[in-house]
């Protein structure tokens, strides 16, 4: 397995487990919900007054937003045979940036624009992977 695919796998696992703090937090705060209560909660766009629940939900949703681009780029790189030190390093960096972003989101760390900087750094990693694919196969 290439380094890029390894970090795609690890990021997939992160995506799969990152919803658990939100769900467990909901159960701790609200107890087990009925189907109707759950539907009403979700339709309210997570207006919970609980700080941790809002953060946990946003951490998961934020990863969902970037995951598609990462998965697509890694799969295209793999299928086209593009695997360089830059794509491997950018894939690893993306994963660790997403771990850092989740920690910052879940802890509520609000200083030094940490969330924005980490999100942007992960985006730069995606752009590096895209550039390597384009440089090898398009230009």
Image (cartoon, rainbow, N blue to C red):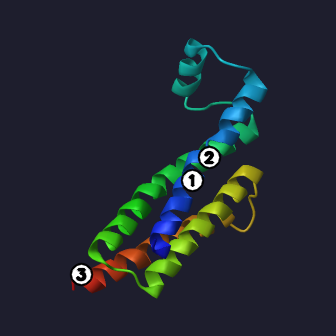
Compute the Cα span from label 1 to label 3: 29 Å
Marker count (numbered): 3
Q: Is residue 30 left or right of residue 85?
A: right
Q: Report if the CB atoms under discs 2 and 3 are less than 8 Å apart.
A: no
Q: Which mark is residue 4?
A: none
Give the residue drawn at x 72%, y 26%: 27
- For the C terminus, the quadrant is bottom left
Compute the Cα span from label 2 to label 3: 35 Å
Please identify the quarter of the rendering in which residue 113 is found: bottom right
Q: Report if the CB atoms under discs 2 and 1 are less than 8 Å apart.
A: yes
Residue 24 in percent (x, y) is at: 71, 34
Dot 3 lies on which element? helix
Residue 118 in percent (x, y) is at: 61, 67
Q: Which residue is at the far left?
A: 138
Q: Is residue 61 visible?
A: yes
Give the residue drawn at x 60%, y 62%: 98
Specify few, some or many for label 2: CA neighbours under 10 Å numbering under 14, 14-19, or 20 or more.
few
Up-down relation of residue 88 to residue 95 (above or below) = below
Residue designated by label 2: 17
Mark closest to the chain's N terminus, 2 or 3: 2
Dot 2 lies on which element? helix
Q: Which mark is residue 13?
A: 1
Give the residue drawn at x 56%, y 46%: 16
Compute the Cα span from label 2 to label 1: 6 Å
Q: Which mark is residue 137?
A: 3
Q: Nearer the viewer, residue 44 or 22?
A: 22
Residue 3 in percent (x, y) is at: 49, 75
Mark closest to the chain's N terminus, 1 or 3: 1
């Amino acid at each position: 397995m290439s380094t890029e695919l390894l970090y795609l796998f690890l990021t997939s696992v992160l995506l799969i487990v990152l919803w658990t703090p939100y769900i467990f937090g909901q159960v701790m705060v609200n107890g087990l919900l009925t189907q109707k209560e759950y539907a009403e909660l979700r339709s309210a766009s997570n207006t919970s007054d609980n700080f941790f629940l809002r953060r946990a939900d946003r951490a998961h949703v934020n990863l969902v937003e970037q995951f598609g681009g990462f998965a697509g780029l890694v799969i295209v790189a793999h299928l086209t045979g593009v695997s360089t030190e830059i794509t491997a390093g950018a894939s690893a960096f993306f994963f660790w940036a997403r771990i850092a972003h989740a920690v910052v989101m879940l802890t509520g760390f609000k200083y030094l624009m940490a969330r924005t900087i980490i999100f942007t750094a992960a985006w730069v990693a995606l752009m590096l992977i895209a550039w390597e694919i384009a440089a090898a196969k398009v230009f």
